[in-house]
Image (tube, helix red, strand yellow):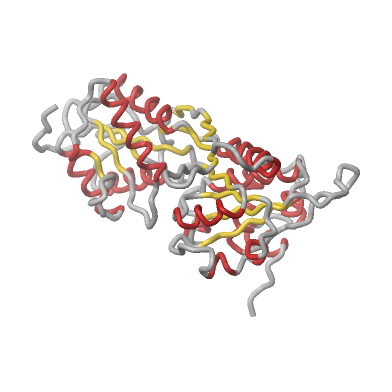
Amino acid sequence: MAKRVNQQLIADKLQVSRATVSRCFTNHPGINPETRGKVFKLAAALGYNHLEPRTGKGRRKSSPNRYGVLICTDVESYESTDYQSPGENLIAGLSEFSQLNNLLMEIHCVDPSEKTLTDPSYAKIETLGRREWDGVVLVYPFPETIVDELNLQVPVVSLVEQYSGTPVNCVDVDHHRGIALILRRLSDLGHKRIGFMTHRYGFDANWALRRHSAYVEEMTRLGLMVDPANVLNVRPTDRLVPEEAYAKALERTRYGVTAWVCAADHQAYGLISFFQQHGVKTPADVSVTGFDGIEKPDWAPELTTAVIPYYEIGQIGGRRLEDLAQKRFGSAQHVMLDCTLREGETVGPATSGSATSGPAAIN
């Protein structure tokens, strides 16, 4: 018989006390954001929702607004411990805003393959079906058909994902500035042949395309050649699974690429691991950068990356949704937050040659 999902089950799985879990849901000042994010991440994956507002003198007499938080991911990936999930800090920021402002927040994981609100993972959310939400926050990329349907029903705020169809309010990072910081650092170290790599996902990852466009823009500004052969998994015809993309990057490294800009940290860690398995050292033979600022795996070197202020994005996303609940109609707004460059151990001076012998690309 399946265990009943409650705070004790969450505490057992995270190996913390039930009191710690309870305090996460009541915004206790003694709980740090990292712990709160882990609790809310697991709660969403298990389908647990804490719907009771704070009690005490500050409680409003009228019913508080209720918001939905939809996380577009399969539960297995969301629960994976291979890499830190950026969603942890987004949810922690949202949670803090909701608790401090006496708002109710429901968190649900939904299936990335589903295209309408009548599909199973959406249909089982009773409060969504009864239209009891005053607004919804979207975490991770969603099919635009879902975004369009939701946008007709309630105010919508997307976090770190912009949509080119229906106008949607978004709180995002400045992708161009992050990539520019990375490329300028690589250029200062003498890198000229710089590749770009991303993964293919089961959905449109517009954030990766924006980082690629920033790569093209900054490479052009720096007077560096963009070789299409050194751009992996961006074109619609590219369908490389991660291992194939890593193998292609290794091949291009042997042909003279001295640095790789990866669209996300987990991609960069995967590439570094693949290089290590094939005798290519980072950064002695090739430099690798990411974009996110997640915690590194135990085995990995500290990654040079652009750090996204996820916690702050979550807080501002909550504020924007609350504003929309009071005044829904008007032009959609995109709020861009700055990011910072975190110097790690995966970037060094450009090598005079490639990692192994091979013809060099003409620059």
Pick out the residue farthest to the left.
359
Reply above or below: 82 against 181: below
Reply above or below: 309 against 54: above
Instruction: Please identify the quarter of the rendering in which residue 260 is found.
Output: top left
Residue drawn at point x = 55 percent, y = 51 percent: 151
Residue 76 visible to an observer of this rendering: no
Residue 109: x %, y % from top left: 56, 60
> Between residues 320 and 36, which one lies in front from this camera angle?
320
Q: Is residue 200 left or right of residue 153?
A: left
> Between residues 82 and 44, which one lies in front from this camera angle?
44
Instruction: Please identify the quarter of the rendering in which residue 361 is found.
Output: top left
Reply above or below: 28 against 124: above
Residue 223: x %, y % from top left: 23, 20
Pick out the residue farthest to the bottom.
1
State the quadrant of the C terminus: top left
Residue 165: x %, y % from top left: 43, 46
Pick out the residue farthest to the front.
329
Residue drawn at point x = 54 percent, y = 54 percent: 71
Residue 199 visible to an observer of this rendering: yes
> Between residues 29 and 137, which one lies in front from this camera angle?
137
Residue drawn at point x = 40 percent, y = 30 percent: 176
Q: Is residue 190 left or right of residue 339?
A: left
Q: Is residue 334 left or right of residue 9?
A: left
Residue 228: x %, y % from top left: 19, 38
> Between residues 282 and 3, which one lies in front from this camera angle?
3
State the quadrant of the N terminus: bottom right
